[in-house]
């Protein structure tokens, strides 16, 4: 059994600031994931320095970040603002791949390959036509780099369930509940899509550890079993 999660950190600023990454790390610690996909881990402008300090991650959560070659900047934690944290024993087996994505704004996904499982962290664009193209690219690349045990998770930026997700027709799509905006969530922007041969044991939206104040998104989680 694996406990997976996804969390848009909003650059560790809560809704309006100040920058307080300890709040986000406390949420991750209490969430207790084996693997978590993170979005908006870096500041957006200039050299895109890390908003989530690398030096605090293992100390506060016991997890380690994926080693992404050619990050967005010399002092960035992720690529296009994304990274994946995981248990240290999983990191020893992990292979990381960057996935450039099409669209009106710069976007990319991060693929974590483990024996028997590929996890893709994503943050899709604000325009539906871009999101459709990005999901089509991710699905096509996943079929080439992975076997049949695939999980995609992240901020899909899609508030509809009946459109925009056509490329995921072959997957189980899990939207555990409203996750945005965090203080009074109404939209299910954060989702998990996984191969149909993976067993979903449980899923939910995490509201503990001050999560309503730590970001504009609440994290989502799922417990799965590999065949």
Image (cartoon, rainbow, N blue to C red):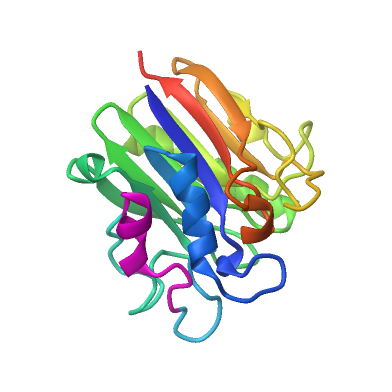
Residue at 77%, 53% in the rendered image: 183
Residue at 53%, 75% in the rendered image: 43
Residue at 53%, 44% in the rendered image: 6
Vertical relation: 125 (above or below) 191: below
Q: Position of residue 136 (x, y in %)?
A: 56, 42
Q: Position of residue 161 (x, y in %)?
A: 76, 33
Vertical relation: 194 (above or below) 109: above
Q: Position of residue 172 (x, y in %)?
A: 58, 23
Vertical relation: 219 (above or below) 167: below
Q: Can residue 16 be found in the magenta stretch? A: no
Instruction: Inspect this view and state whether residue 67 appears.
Output: yes
Residue 57 position by quadrant: bottom left
Quarter of the image with the N terminus is top left
Residue at 47%, 49% in the rendered image: 28
Vertical relation: 2 (above or below) 124: above
| Highlighted range, magenta | 49-65
Residue 167 position by quadrant: top right
Q: Position of residue 114 (x, y in %)?
A: 27, 36
Q: Can residue 50 be found in the magenta stretch? A: yes
Question: Which is more toward the observer, 97 or 227?
Answer: 227
Relative to residue 43, is residue 87 drawn left or right?
left
Question: Which is more toward the observer, 75 or 61?
Answer: 61
């Amino acid at each position: 059994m694996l406990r997976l999660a996804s969390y848009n950190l909003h650059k560790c600023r809560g809704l309006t600031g100040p920058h307080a990454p300890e709040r986000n790390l406390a949420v991750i610690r209490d969430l207790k994931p084996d693997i978590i996909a993170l979005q908006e881990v870096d500041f957006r402008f200039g050299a895109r320095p890390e908003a989530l300090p690398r030096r605090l991650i293992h100390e506060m959560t016991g997890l380690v970040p994926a080693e992404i070659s050619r990050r967005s900047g010399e002092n960035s934690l992720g690529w296009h603002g994304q990274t994946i944290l995981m248990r240290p024993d999983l990191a020893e087996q992990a292979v990381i791949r960057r996935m450039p994505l099409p669209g009106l704004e710069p976007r990319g996904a991060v693929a974590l390959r483990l024996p028997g499982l590929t996890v893709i962290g994503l943050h899709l664009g604000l325009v539906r036509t871009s999101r459709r193209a990005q999901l089509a690219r991710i699905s096509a690349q996943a079929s080439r780099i992975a076997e049949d045990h695939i999980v995609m998770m992240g901020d899909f930026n899609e508030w509809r369930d009946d459109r925009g997700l056509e490329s995921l027709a072959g997957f189980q799509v899990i939207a555990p509940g409203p996750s945005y905006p965090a203080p009074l969530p109404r939209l299910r922007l954060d989702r998990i899509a996984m191969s149909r041969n993976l067993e979903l044991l449980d899923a939910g939206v995490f509201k503990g550890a001050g999560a309503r104040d730590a970001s504009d998104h609440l994290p989502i989680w799922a417990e799965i079993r590999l065949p």
